[in-house]
Amino acid sequence: MDTNRTILIAGGGIGGLTLGVALRRAGFSVRIFERAAALRPAGAGITMQTNAILAFRTIGLDSAVAAAGHVMQRGAILDWRGHTLGTMLVSEMAQELGAPMIAIHRARLQEVLQEALGPEPLTLGIKVVGFREEAEGVCARLSDGTEVRGELLVGADGLRSTVRAQLLNDGEPRYAGYTSWRGVCEVPGLADASSTAETWGQGLRFGIVPLGQGRTYWFATANLPAGGIDAPDAHGELLSRFSGWHEPIRALIENTPAAAIVRTDIHDRPPVQRWARGRVALLGDAAHPMTPNMGQGGGQAVEDAVVLARCLATEKELPAALSRYEALRVPRANGFVSQSRRLGQIGQWENAVACWARDRLFQLVPERGMRANLRRVLTFTSI
């Protein structure tokens, strides 16, 4: 494609910013429109697994992301007493594949991406509210009443994407059946600084992810109807649900201000086979929103971004570029959507006998099988 033409991006999250960086480094002109007036640290922490770091490497950002985050050495699945059900082979896979697993605060990751992007392409406080295709391009309608034109519009505007709604008209996301709480504890020394863990109970889970500098990101899940609220605050709700669970779960909850705990219902969408039509394409959660059970939502958005940028840079015609993008990305990302949903359903089982059997079976998974599965998940091949 002609790199003199402008690519429009709806959404300034991880996927949109990464795409902006990748496109600019390939010589394209880029404009990104983000509805938030400022890029705030929503969501607390995130893990950029080995595949995401390998994808960042293709655009020269792996070192910057790693330096801004915290390298994970170990990982485990535990039961509510703290007994190990399985290990995640974090350092082993990092060594084999040549890139670490990085835990990082979302705000810090956005800062790294913004620094690489530069200030000019990003417009805050404005969202894309619609689009129409024209003979020589696409026209995006903005929330301030203005319009902007480009060669391609990429919807990277999240779970409830406005661009997707017009492109696919496939309704609301589906509720997974459980809600989540997330927070960052700023008290040092409560959790192992080099190990991530997820604890499984009956209809409940709790995850611990160290972010470095004494901070620990944590998350919790529970089977509840959508739309619930914590009364009077999240502390009482969480301490009651996780009473008796192994340390440092109680300490992490108690030492996180209630006002800093974010509650979010978990949603995804059934996979679709087409992410592009005409001069409009989807990326990240707008294309393939997934439950967080495999920790791959952000990583898959990063993979989307670098692959789409490469396809646009190497194919002469836009239809060929978008067709290649879909061929390379749809099967892999959709696989994560389905696998993550199944894993979440198993993790949220409530029946005591079923949970006992689940935990015993997890302990019997051979390391060879686990390594082979992780190799498939964590390998990213540049096109």
Image (spheres, rainbow, N blue to C red):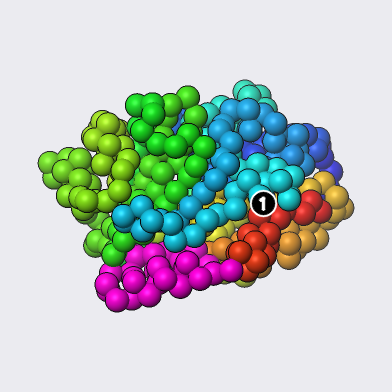
Hey, which residue is sitting farthest left in the picture? Answer: 232
Q: Which residues are magenta?
A: 339-366
- 250 and 7: which is toward the camera: 250
Answer whether residue 340 is magenta in the image.
yes
SS majority, magenta: helix
Residue at image coords 30%, 48%: 246
* Disc 1 secondary structure class: helix
Instruction: Looking at the picture, tell me which residue is in the foreground, 115 or 273.
Output: 115
Q: Mark 1 Cα within 10 Å, few/some/many (few <14, many 20+)?
A: some
Residue 333 on image: x %, y %: 61, 61
**Snapshot quadrant of residue 227:** bottom left
Give the vertical position of 350 relative to 58 (above or below): below
Residue 56 image point, x, y percent: 70, 40
In depth, the one of 184 and 208 nearer the eye is 208
Q: Which residue is mark 1?
A: 93
Instruction: Say whether residue 351 is left or right of residue 310.
Output: left
Q: Quadrant of residue 334?
A: bottom right
**Looking at the picture, how far across and down is residue 302, in whole percent?**
64, 46
Residue shown at 79% from the left, 51% from the top: 382
- Three-letter amino acid code at the position of disc 1: Met
Q: Examine the rendered structure and indicate whether residue 301 appears above or below residue 329.
A: above
Q: Is residue 347 visible?
A: yes
Say whether residue 231 is magenta: no
Query: In the image, is 254 to the left or to the right of 25?
Result: left
Instruction: Measuring from the top left, give residue 264's x and y in whole percent.
Output: 33, 49
